[in-house]
Image (tube, helix red, strand yellow):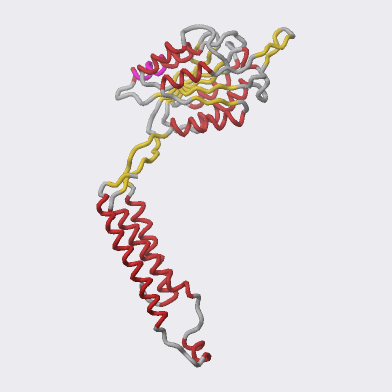
Amino acid sequence: MIWESPLRLWLLLGVLALVVAYLVVQRRRSRYAVRFTNLRLLDRVAPERPAWRRHVPAGLFLAMLALLVVGFARPSAEVRVPRERATVMVAVDVSTSMLATDVDPDRLAAAKQAARRFVEGLPDEFNVGLVAFAGSAAVLVPPSTDRDALDEGIGRLAEGITGVQGTAIGEAINTSLGAVKSLDSEAAKEPPPARIILLSDGANTSGMDPMEAAAEAVTAEVPVHAISFGTPSGFVDRGGRPIQVPVDGQTLKAVAEETGGMFHEASTSDELRAVYDDIGSSVGYRTERQDVSARFIGLGLVFAMGAAAGSMRWFSRLP
């Protein structure tokens, strides 16, 4: 937390002095309290009450003063605020290895379910597009606010290109960048920030060099958040023979680090959903510094009302 007027915090010494004065007065009061010898008369004129009640209004009042001083010093803090607009490209590996059943029901089906949930959680104003890639990459849904088209596109991830061998991570990044640039060129005002969310289970085996594509993403100021999905024990059936397809996230990690994005690993459907939730919270929000003095002043007013209510309720007077 940063203070715009830190010298005003010295006023807290005044509040501390009031606390000390209150304690001294209470001690002196108890020392010189009037003593009753007639206990029946004492019960009649001063019925027994919890001793702590008389300290509550004073405590709340002093806390109110401290909070008002803190607010008077004009504190500011980093606050997460929703983005008003953004472009998000979701790129999903649909190669043969994504049919491995080490993740229930299989890697691709789990990826589709998680992608749907991720998209549903994004603000309606965001432009979201979909890219499928295996040995090559293709835009299934251009970035737009049409969520029905996107949902249909996610459903079609298993068609056509599925079963093709090869993993073209570089092509997926390059194709996603092309879709982002195409949308930006149509924008009448400054283009919104863009992100690429790329999910794969293996290393790059064909097409454009991923690091070359990552360099282009850096130039375009588009971070790539990469997800390595699967387990080391994954396999697919090819002609009756089990073929090992262990997950390999080294390339994805390098791409994420190069572009300033996040790298995640997930080996189950639940872990993948958690990863998408984490990415969604970073994509859908931005951090900015804001004045938060109103929080302390508001809480101070609540304490003041609590002090007044307690004093009126128990002692029929204001503190």
Which of 1/140 is in front?
1
202 displayed left or right of 317: right
Q: Is residue 212 magenta?
A: no
Question: Does 152 sit above or below residue 241?
Answer: below
Give x and y (percent) for residue 259: 41, 20
Quarter the C terminus occupies? bottom left
Whether residue 180 appears in magenta in the rendering, the answer is: yes
Q: Please identify the dominant SS of the magenta region.
A: helix
Q: Is residue 251 above or below residue 34?
A: above
Q: Looking at this view, is 83 or 228 the one in front?
A: 228
Q: Residue at x 44, y 75 (%)?
A: 314
What residue is at 58 percent from the left and 24 percent from the top? 112
Examine the image and state in which quarter residue 289 appears.
Answer: top left
The x and y percentages for residue 308 are: 38, 69
Left or right of 175? Residue 245 is: right
Give the residue drawn at x 40%, y 66%.
59
Number of numbered discs present?
0
Range shown magenta: 178-184
Q: Position of residue 129 (x, y in %)?
A: 46, 21
Which residue occupies 53% across, 91% down?
40
Q: Quadrant of the N terminus?
A: top left
